[in-house]
Image (cartoon, rainbow, N blue to C red):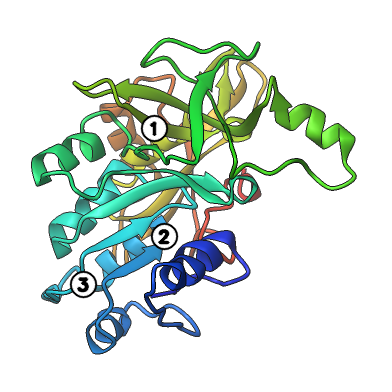
Amino acid sequence: MCVLPIHHVNGTVVTMITPFYVGGSTVLNQKFSAGHFFEVVEEEKVHIVSVVPTLLQYLTNYYSEKEAPSIDQFRHIICGAGPLTVQVAQNFEEKFDIPIIHGYGLSETTCYSCFMPADHSKQEHNKWMRDFGYPSIGIPIPANEMDIHDEKGNSVPEGEKGEIVIRGVNVMKGYFNNKEANESAFTNGWFRSGDEGFIKRDAKGNPFFFITGRLKELIIRGGINLAPLEIDEVINKAPGVKAGISVGFENDWYGEEVGAYIQLKEGADEDEQSILDYCHDHLPFSKAPKVVVFGDELPVTSTGKYQRLKVA
């Protein structure tokens, strides 16, 4: 079932073209509605839906005080195209008992480049989705290779952070008539995603990839790179918080300092100090927000991605 805009590569490739390619069908929705989502899934006998993390939050929040529906034919929910935290994934899976098949890719790579395996046991699935600080985006698909590189284009050791790079037949040849963009996008045949991540290998040596954030969105405090998603994870566990993101703001001493932009749950009375205290209790001082800004909602794109730089 397609609930994402079809002008987006996820909506087009994953939920429209792919089902047709294997002899399936697709249910189109004019817009997403948390209240009608499972009704349509049941009525149309949907097996798989592809969403962004924001929609998982909408569903979890909508059913927070309601009984979760049970739909036998619903196999799993694909999630990508935005930052998914361990907390958001765990809340959804525990509420609905539906596994999230987390994946990663870009328009430049014909959408998904890697996926979490759909045949894992629940224990194995939970391990890769919850035990490493970030939900795994899975292993590379057969059409491409992936690696983690440093700034000089060298592979980094397992567990060390660097830039996610991709090469394969599904990767674009280049940006049309834009030599400058192509020179910065490719190094030694590898497409540079602009995303930071790391690898962990399983017992068989399979590389499981993790994304920690956009390199352009990293908060550089005193010369140290801080991954926003790690801070987001704590912010969204704070009492009274419906949704929140960390942002960097200019600081005379450190260059950048950490702040938080937060939408509170309806009826919540938490103030800035209570949020700051919670974050300081659960994060090192360098990563904990020093200021909180409250808003009615977090700015998102048409595909549900948080616009972090818009509130920085």
N-term-proximal mark, 3 vs 1 = 3
Apparent side of residue 33 relative to residue 75 in the rendered image (left or right): right
Which of the image's four quarters has the N terminus?
bottom left
Circle 1 SS class: strand
Q: Amino acid at mark 3?
A: Tyr
Q: CA distance from mark 2 to mark 3?
A: 15 Å
Residue 159, given in percent of the width and then of the height, sits at 36, 16
Q: Label 2: which residue?
A: 54
In this rendering, the label closer to the viewer, 3 or 1: 1
> What amino acid is at disc 2?
Thr
Who comes first in sequence, dot 2 or dot 3?
A: 2
What is the spatial separation of the Cα atoms under label 3 and label 1, in whole angstroms?
29 Å
Which numbered circle lies on residue 22?
Answer: none
Provide the residue designation for mark 1: 210
Circle 2/circle 3 CB separation < 8 Å: no
Q: Place residue 138 in its image quadrant.
A: top left
Q: Residue shown at 31%/39% (left/top)?
A: 135
Instruction: Classify the position of the C terminus by image quarter.
Output: top right
Mark 3 lies on residue: 63
